[in-house]
């Protein structure tokens, strides 16, 4: 039995909070200032967190290790299984050549690079964030923005800013799932609340994008498209999170914003840019794309993402949910008995999803996509292996970060920072009850 104490350092909440923030502070310093690689930063921060839990919060070392393993195992199905299969599906489209077709298709919608930036960084980036998360949309959307003529640094900034709107529901609502796990609050309730807040940000992000890309001229000439894309995304995200599916909130928002721009461009066009704007040749590229890519090729390029939407939509049906739930097992994590400072027990129930896990549904979408794209089983398996190699450093990073989060939460460090020091007049969150 371990009972949390939120002011273990001589009864001082302030000094205890300084100790509790050491794991997070060390990670920020190593990543942002010292430029140490993420996996090494995560390992060192995890060790610091364990030391604080053991020496400051008096958590038994066996319990510290057990909680760390609990967090790492939790991350396998909720984070890593999603990331691996999402990146694999993306790599399938790259290997088959259909991702290039997808990238070129944006030039068919508009030859204005600012509109393309909204479509690529905001709409398509949100779709990638919804499926994979973990920085994937920044890498993919950033590369696509460079391909249309943006400077690499500006492309990276635009991709990062665009990801602020969908990241709350990233990787098929992994942040909401994790929050529900560590707080004990209902997943749907958390999703509904987030779905009422993030659309406000989403409605403004495209305006920021065109300002970063083209300053006042961009705002003056493309504000209509930016507002339409942002409002469409935010409205669809809110509707999905509040009434349909928290998991698909970003997917629905991404498709709605792209569709809204396509419809808008039927009736409205931005003012033409000078020929040398952004030092690219968008018009020429667009003409080439129109000739080289058939309608069938375009449909195949979008097929994997349409399959994902279809599979996750079907998975929401009651009968299908019942069938998928046969692969779900719940049990109390062995060896853990933890109570909050007030003596109330803290839940350590572990849910093992097999069939219904988002990563498993993504795997199914990948298998069907491979067949749709006419890829052999050998090529698909080879691509999967290369994906695992590609993510060889991301895997330990995620494992360590999740282990750190669980140790902070179950040792009482999170309660010291959140429920005590930062909000002393507020009741402690339910995860500590």
Image (tube, rainbow, N blue to C red):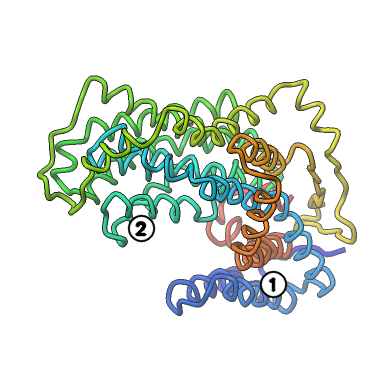
CA gap, disc 1 and disc 2: 43 Å
Q: Secondary structure at mark 2?
A: helix
Task: Give 399 or 308, whichever is nearer the viewer.
Answer: 308
Q: Nearer the viewer, mark 1 or mark 2?
A: 2
Residue at the spot 53% in from the left edge and 59% down from the top edge: 422
Residue 267 point in image, percent of width and height? 23, 20
Element carrying mark 1: loop
Q: Residue 102: x and y, percent? A: 43, 39
Q: Quadrant of residue 9?
A: bottom right
The N terminus - image quarter: bottom right
> Height in image: 31 above or below 164?
below
322 vs 14, nearest the viewer: 322
Q: Which residue is mark 2?
A: 156
> Which residue has dot 1 on it?
8
Quick check: can you spot residue 430?
A: yes
Asked whether, in this view, residue 357 is left or right of residue 37, the answer is: right
Please name the residue shown 63% across and 26% down the image.
313
Q: Is residue 265 left or right of residue 392?
A: left
Position of 424 compared to 66: left or right? left
Q: Is residue 129 left or right of residue 114?
A: right
Q: Residue at the spot x=66%, y=38% of the render? A: 187
Q: Earlier along the polypeptide chain: callout 1 or callout 2?
A: 1
Q: Residues within 10 Å of mark 2 (few under 14, many from 20)?
A: many
Looking at the picture, how far across and down is residue 409, in whole percent? 68, 60
Q: Is residue 30 above or below residue 230?
A: below
Q: Position of residue 141 (x, y in %)?
A: 41, 50
Query: Is disc 1 in contact with disc 2, using a CB cutoff of under 8 Å?
Result: no
Q: Residue at x 71, y 53 (%)?
A: 432
């Amino acid at each position: 039995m371990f009972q949390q104490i939120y002011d273990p350092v001589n009864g001082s909440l302030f000094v205890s909070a300084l100790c509790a923030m050491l794991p997070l502070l060390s990670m920020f310093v190593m990543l942002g200032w010292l430029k140490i690689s993420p996996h090494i930063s995560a390992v060192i921060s995890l060790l610091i967190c364990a030391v604080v839990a053991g020496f400051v919060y008096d958590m038994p070392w066996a319990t510290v290790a057990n909680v760390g393993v609990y967090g790492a195992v939790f991350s396998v199905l909720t984070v890593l299984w999603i990331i691996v299969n999402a990146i694999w599906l993306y790599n399938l489209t790259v290997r088959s050549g259909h991702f290039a077709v997808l990238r070129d298709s944006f030039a068919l919608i508009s030859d204005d690079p600012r509109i393309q930036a909204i479509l690529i960084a905001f709409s398509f980036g949100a779709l990638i964030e919804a499926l994979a998360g973990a920085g994937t949309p920044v890498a993919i959307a950033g590369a696509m923005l460079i391909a249309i003529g943006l400077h690499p640094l500006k492309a990276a900034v635009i991709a990062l800013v665009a990801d602020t709107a969908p990241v709350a529901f990233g990787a098929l609502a992994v942040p909401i799932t994790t929050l529900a796990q560590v707080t004990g609050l209902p997943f749907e309730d958390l999703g509904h609340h987030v779905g009422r807040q993030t659309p406000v940000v989403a409605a403004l992000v495209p305006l920021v994008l065109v300002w970063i890309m083209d300053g006042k001229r961009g705002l003056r000439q493309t504000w209509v498209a930016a507002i339409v894309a942002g409002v469409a995304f935010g409205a669809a995200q809110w509707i999905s999170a509040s009434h349909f599916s928290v998991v698909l909130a970003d997917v629905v928002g991404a498709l709605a914003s792209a569709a809204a721009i396509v419809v808008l461009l039927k009736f409205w066009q931005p003012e033409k840019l000078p020929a040398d704007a952004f030092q690219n040749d968008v018009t020429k590229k667009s003409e080439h794309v129109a000739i080289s890519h058939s309608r069938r090729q375009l449909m195949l390029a979008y097929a994997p993402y349409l399959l994902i939407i279809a599979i996750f939509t079907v998975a929401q049906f009651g009968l299908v949910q019942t069938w998928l739930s046969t692969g779900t097992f719940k049990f109390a994590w062995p060896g853990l008995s933890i109570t909050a400072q007030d003596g109330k027990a803290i839940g350590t129930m572990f849910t093992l999803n097999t069939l219904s896990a988002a990563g498993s549904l993504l795997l199914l979408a990948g298998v069907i996509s491979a067949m749709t794209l006419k890829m052999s089983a050998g090529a698909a398996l080879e691509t999967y292996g290369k994906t695992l190699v590609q993510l060889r450093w991301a895997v330990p990073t995620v494992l360590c970060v999740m282990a750190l989060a669980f140790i902070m939460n179950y040792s009482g460090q999170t309660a010291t920072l959140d429920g005590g020091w930062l909000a002393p007049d507020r009741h402690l969150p339910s995860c500590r009850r």
